[in-house]
Amino acid sequence: MTLTCFIRYKLDPAKLELFRRYAENWAQIIPACGGDLLGYFLPHEGTNCEGWGLVSFTSLAEYEAYRRRLSEDAKAKENFAFARREGFIFEEYRTFLAAEPQSYLRTVALKG
């Protein structure tokens, strides 16, 4: 079963470029620590203070092992410190979702 950690961020709309940098850093760190990064998403239109990150794992045990590796990783520690220092994240929420296997990572090919 695939579990996806859905992270919702409440952001400072005046500091979205800092959040972009934070997300770019995770693009290297998360896979190196064992997470399957589906992506980070920044506001584009509409609400300007909410961002998302989605990271998948094969099990809750794999997520727990990932969190241990993350807590020891120098680049991860540096990225967390960057966020605290710059203050662009006001709140962070985590929800774990189970993927419906028949729909996970499916695309539809449109024939023209």
Image: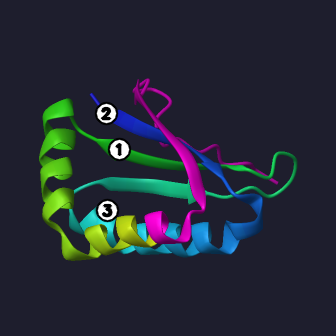
| Mark linked to residue 42 | none
Q: Which secondary structure lies at badge 3?
A: helix
Residue 54 relative to residue 45: left or right: left
Q: Residue 92: percent from the left, percent from the top?
A: 50, 43
Q: Nearer the viewer, mark 3 or mark 2?
A: 3
Q: Which secondary structure lies at badge 2?
A: loop
Cα separation, mark 2 vs mark 1, equals 7 Å
Whether the magenta-drawn stretch holds residue 86 is answered as yes
| Residue beneath the point at 55% across and 43% down | 91
Q: Nearer the viewer, mark 1 or mark 3?
A: 3
Q: What residue is disc 2 on?
A: 2
Q: Residue 83: percent from the left, percent from the top?
A: 47, 66
Q: Earlier in the sequence, mark 3 or mark 2?
A: 2
| Mark linked to residue 30 | 3
Type of amino acid under label 1: Ser
Type of amino acid under label 3: Ile
Q: What residue is disc 1 on?
A: 56
In the image, which residues are magenta?
83-112
Q: Earlier in the sequence, mark 2 or mark 1?
A: 2
Q: Residues within 10 Å of mark 3 (few under 14, many from 20)?
A: some
Type of amino acid under label 2: Thr
| Residue beneath the point at 43% across and 74% down | 25
